[in-house]
Image (cartoon, rainbow, N blue to C red):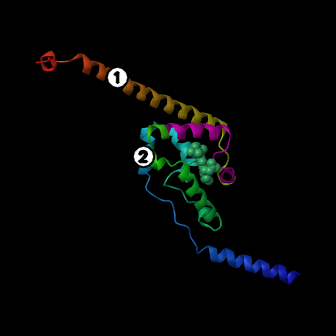
Amino acid sequence: MLTKIKNLFIVLLLVLVITQFLRPEKNEASYTSITTFEDLASVTPDIQSILQNQCYDCHSNTTRYPWYMEVSPVSHWMAYHIDEGKKHFNVSNWEAYTAKQKDHKLEELIEEIEKKKMPLESYTWMHGELPSADAEKLIAWAKEVRAKAKDTLNTKAKDSLQLKVSDTTAIDSTKVALK
Ligand code: HEC
């Protein structure tokens, strides 16, 4: 029995050693893709540090890699979550999202944080939970960005409406007069 356990242990150890050589591709683009998002979404230094510590690792093209994230199986587990996280919400693609998509992502963000679904529970084992004060800050920020975007859209809609009205009133009668 004891030798069986010993053998099993050796096999497990070998698997662990071998998988260290199967390194998943890293998610390490430059920070500039995030800067665009931060500019467009009025990210303050306060909000930036929360997002950096709790969200960007899975929701941007730039993940930080502390040593334990380089070790299999953590490295594979993390690569999977980065893939999944980016599929749903990637700040590095922020500019490419339509106004409607941006609004929807922010709505989801508020919901996920309110339901305490984000950051993923398994991630908080290593990084600590999102403090409730930070959660509130993120929610307030997201609500403000949504409201501001709505305002901009409304002003744009009004402007184009006014443009149409003035277009129709400024008719040059000499040009439209019937001959
Ligand atoms: C360990 C990786 C990881 C971290 C860290 C993480 N997320 Fe996620 N996130 C995911 C994955 C995977 C999904 C998709 C599956 C799911 O919803 O569980 C997701 C989904 C989401 C969605 C839903 C998008 C949609 O359209 O459905 C939002 C919004 C989100 N995360 C925001 C955040 C925010 C904000 C933080 C930081 C407070 C955060 N996430 C931290 C991995 C992560």
**SS label for mark 2:** helix
| Residue beneath disc 1 | 161
For label 2, the residue is: 96
| Residue occupying the point 63% across, 74% down | 19
Quadrant occupied by the N terminus: bottom right
Neighbours of disc 1 within 10 Å: few (<14), some (14-19), many (20+): few
**Above or below for 158 versus 25:** above
Q: Residue at x 52, y 63 (%)?
A: 26
Rendered image quadrant of residue 30: bottom left
Relative depth, front residue between 179 and 51 = 179
Please tell me whether residue 110 belongs to the stretch shown in magenta. Answer: yes
Q: Residue furthest right?
A: 1
Distance, label 2 to label 1, CA atoms, is 26 Å
Q: Nearer the viewer, mark 2 or mark 1?
A: 1
Which of 153 and 47 lies nearest the eye of the viewer? Answer: 153
Is 8 in the magenta?
A: no
Question: Please, what is the three-letter code of the amino acid marked with disc 1?
Answer: Leu
Q: Amino acid at mark 2?
A: Ala
Instruction: Find numbered disc 1 in the image and state the secondary structure of the residue it sits on.
Output: helix
Give the mark, 2 or 1, whose residue is nearer the N terminus.
2
